[in-house]
Image (cartoon, rainbow, N blue to C red):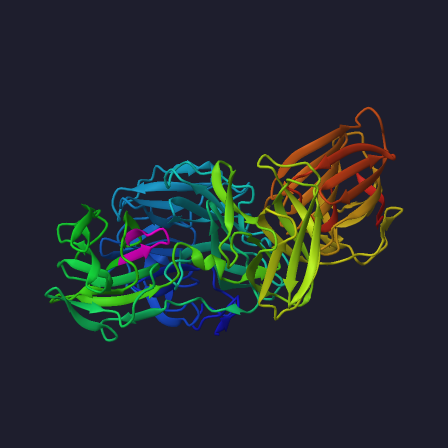
Amino acid sequence: MKTYKNPFALKNQWSENEFGDPFIMRFNGFYYLYCSSAGDHIKCWVSENLIDFDYVGSVCDEAEIFGAYAPEVCYYNGNFYMITSPVGSGHYLLKSDKPTGPFHLISDNYGLLIDGSFYIDDDGKQYMLRAGHNGIIIHIMPSPDEIDVNGMLIPESYLNYWTEGPMIIKRNGYYYLTYTGNHLHSKGYRVAYSVSKTSPTSGYVNLKNQTLLLETGPEFHGLGHSSSFLAPDLDSYCIAYHNFDLDSNPRKRSANIDRLFFNGARMYCNPIWWEQDAHKMPEFCCRGNEKLNLCMVEQTNYFITPMETKEFFTAEINVNAKGEDICFLYGYKDNRYGTVLLKTDLTYEIKEDGCLLKTGAINHAVSRHAIVTLRFVKKSDSYVDVFINNMFLCTYKSKLTSGYIGIQETSNQEIGFIGYSVSVDGNEDKYAKKAIPGRFDAVHCEEEIETRAFTDAGMEIYSAVYKKDQRYTYKVNVKKTGYYKVIARVLGSRDRISIKAVVNETVITLDGILSGVKDEEGYEIISLGTLVITQDLDCIIFMSENSDITIDYFEFVEHSSLHALTVIKDGNLVTDQLKVIGHKGSKSMIHKYSGFTCAENLGMAFIGEDGLSDYNIVASINRNHKPTGDVSIYVRATKESWFPAQVKESLFGYCIKVSYEGIHLYRVQYGEEHLAFYSIQDKISTKLELKIHVKDSTINVFLNNQLVITYVDPAAFMFGKIGLSATGEGFGFDNFSVYYD
């Protein structure tokens, strides 16, 4: 099978070092890729499979768009509209009759900051989204060549700092708004999302983990400015984004494409920068009528496919009928068939075996004198969803099974892409390979599985119910051979969870102990143990040793270990294993009068790798009795990043912060959630002897051998590095050691 690898380079990029803000539009079976400009024109590439891209050339040479940021394109009423921000200075609208241009200006500069993006809802109403200082701003577009400058803030889309790169897709009734935050030059540049069932402008919520794309390691980092689009299988979705190699010289932005997965309101993605399978293509596709058969059905000629669809399928037909009716044929077999008729008066009729099932109107965003895209989804419950130009048209129940699909022959029509796929209603999420290391939902196994609904921020998601001794298979893509920790979010109904894992025909029992402290849905996150996984592994099979175990998701992280280690002694760094980061690089933390502390205002440092889990830390801390600074100890820290212009708390994990007033415990997720506090303002004046014990989902903090904070987190971070930081003056570490029980 053909494979590809992120990041990938394209011919005729601006340079080998510059491909930023990738936007991909799917139209008539082609994928058109645009990116930010580093010169006086906008470039475009085209592909049918998202791997082999051909360079089209310039699609716009207008003088006003020099240095065009993040050009994006939509198809509306037979025309293509582009929005772009030249050198980040406001927005222009442009128009063309082809996705390859030439695009010409149709507006003055609207201002409105940067990163414009179009969204067209099912009713044909059009919106423009763009970056904002306090979150993404959405604007109504009264017409495709006009923006109402009075936009509305979507407050849920704020990433605690400058937020940009917005886009909306709609799937199964959910509006998914993606956006990018932190700073372009931060390794913690990341993509997050919010979800709404109300409208594209309101009703958004953030799930517990709103992060979609984030990596900060030396191999792959600075992920951001994404666009999402229908995959070649006609049903799944992919996401394009750039990574920014900030360690290279010169620095380099490159394009990437990965797969999105959906589970109710949840959307997730694991960035993969190692080899992965090519995107699944339709079971049949062609352009024009060369591969179609001409067949007469009740005195009417149809071009039909040479093979039948399965009973459940997704089909797409693109045609320019040049003002005539368009009639789509489906389920044709044994003199039975259905038709979807799009009429010249912008109404439609749907019939099966001559009986009228559905009628209605087509909105004004569809032109009858240009290409119309009809997508037809026959789902496993026999309901059919019909989309026109990617807008939902209607749903109804069908009595037909498998059969041929086709399109009625007319005198002037131009037939474009036609295809069908057995990928339907997200079923390909079950068979697509899941990344290891990475996280994937338990419901996405190959077998049919009982599900249990739960809510996150009021939105419905589904977990999997494992039946005793039944096998549940997950296709996997393993980065490299090694030992991997297995983490799971489970419904806590007993004291212990036992699961058998079948890896390369070897059966291993995984055990996890539940704390009894559960979240509001009754779940908790536990460690199940360690597996040896080889790079060539194709699948992992899980089986429950208990009956009816309910699992939300699995997470795999490469195991790592760390010997007992003295890090700081008498205020001096005594190991080379501490990685210091900050604006002075490795000199951001140094020995000073208060011990080992920040050189200027802020310094951070980390020990070990992500796969560390349970450990103890002993630290002697010099504390000022005035609010001039603080020191922090991080446990279970991952995805850490430092940059002056970014969210200060740029990591995942826990922070034990010592200030003049006391000891704070925070949960950190590119922002802080305060968990606990112990006051020492009137108890200890200068030096603190601290011990931190981290095991399973429990964090214990001891001061002078007295337990002062204990916290059990049902949504625990179960692995991560050890870290420390300091700000301001008067606070520092005299001693810092790591040991194990």
Find residue 214 and report its horizontal and vertical position in percent.
57, 53
Q: Residue at x 31, y 53 (%)?
A: 390
| Visible residue check, residue 162 | yes
Q: Is residue 489 magenta?
A: no
| Residue 472 drawn above or below residue 174 | below
Of residues 324 and 539, the one drawn nearer to the viewer in this rendering: 539
Q: What secondary structure do most residues of the magenta stretch adopt?
A: strand
| Visible residue check, residue 111 | no
Find residue 37 and report its horizontal and vertical position in percent.
42, 61
Query: On the picture, is 79 further left or further right than 280?
Result: left
Q: Is residue 386 magenta?
A: yes
Q: Which residues are magenta?
A: 374-387
Q: Looking at the rendering, which quadrant does residue 367 occupy? A: bottom left
Of residues 45 and 529, the one drawn nearer to the viewer in this rendering: 529
- Residue furthest to the right in view is 570
Find residue 384 and report its horizontal and vertical position in percent.
30, 52
| Residue 406 drawn above or below residue 457 | below
Query: On the picture, is 611 further left or further right than 135?
Result: right
Q: Looking at the rendering, which quadrant does residue 504 occupy? A: bottom right
Find residue 714 and report its horizontal and vertical position in percent.
65, 39
Query: On the picture, is 224 further left or further right than 75?
Result: right
